Amino acid sequence: PSPQPSAAPQAPPANSTAAGNSSAPAASMVRSAVAGPVEMSWTPPAENEADLLMTLTFGGTGWFSFGIGQGMADADILMMRFTNGNGEIVDTKSSGYVMPAADGSQDATIVSATEEGGKTTITFQRALDTGDGDDKVINRGDKALPVMFAWSTTSDAFGFHGQDYTMGKIDLF
């Protein structure tokens, strides 16, 4: 199934509609999508902002990932986990149906990370255009960005996800 976008406004709910459209400017609107056991939320960056701030909440305590791409071949994937009391995010490049390799430039920064009540939440920041050839550029005009999510509920060790994945398209703006 595709991630199902919805909107959850920071401003009073009267500004929001079921489709996620709002009379408020985009920068004041928190958006969210659910993909399997992963929920993501973000505020679309304002025109003068070059970074995307995103929070992923995983309904488990293993690892999880968020990727940009049509599939495992040529995908930009952020792999996340919470181990030894700390959140970790690894910026990877996938070139096929194998374990993605960490790319030479780690371009996502953890803002906060928690693991409580059987859920892991990681908030991170990433530039829309990192300037790194291993990362996908997130274009403001792309209303159907291909995304993917994968996870393991049984292990913190990054590894094969089997059937634990989903793909879809999403508008981050």
Image (tube, helix red, strand yellow):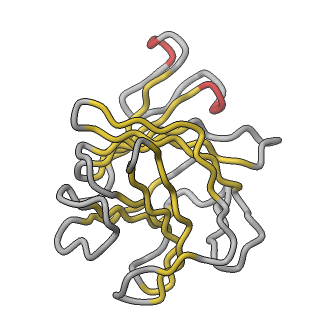
Give the quarter of the image for residue 96.
bottom left
| Residue nearer the viewer, 89 or 143 | 89
Question: Would you say 31 lies left or right of 36 here?
Answer: right
Q: Nearer the viewer, residue 2 or 74?
A: 74
Q: Residue at x 44, y 80 (%)?
A: 100
Foreground residue, 172 or 83? 83
Residue 89 x %, y %: 51, 57
Give the residue displayed 22% in from the left and 37% down from the top.
Answer: 118
Q: Quadrant of the N terminus?
A: bottom left
Q: Which percent across, then down, holds residue 102?
A: 54, 76
94 shown above or below 129:
below
User: Which residue: 44% across, 33% down?
Assistant: 20
Q: Residue furthest front?
A: 84
**At x 58% / y 22%, what residue is drawn?**
23
Residue 80: image quadrant is bottom left
Give residue 2's position: percent from left, percent from top.
Answer: 30, 58
Q: Is residue 143 left or right of residue 119?
A: right
Q: Position of residue 62 (x, y in %)?
A: 27, 54
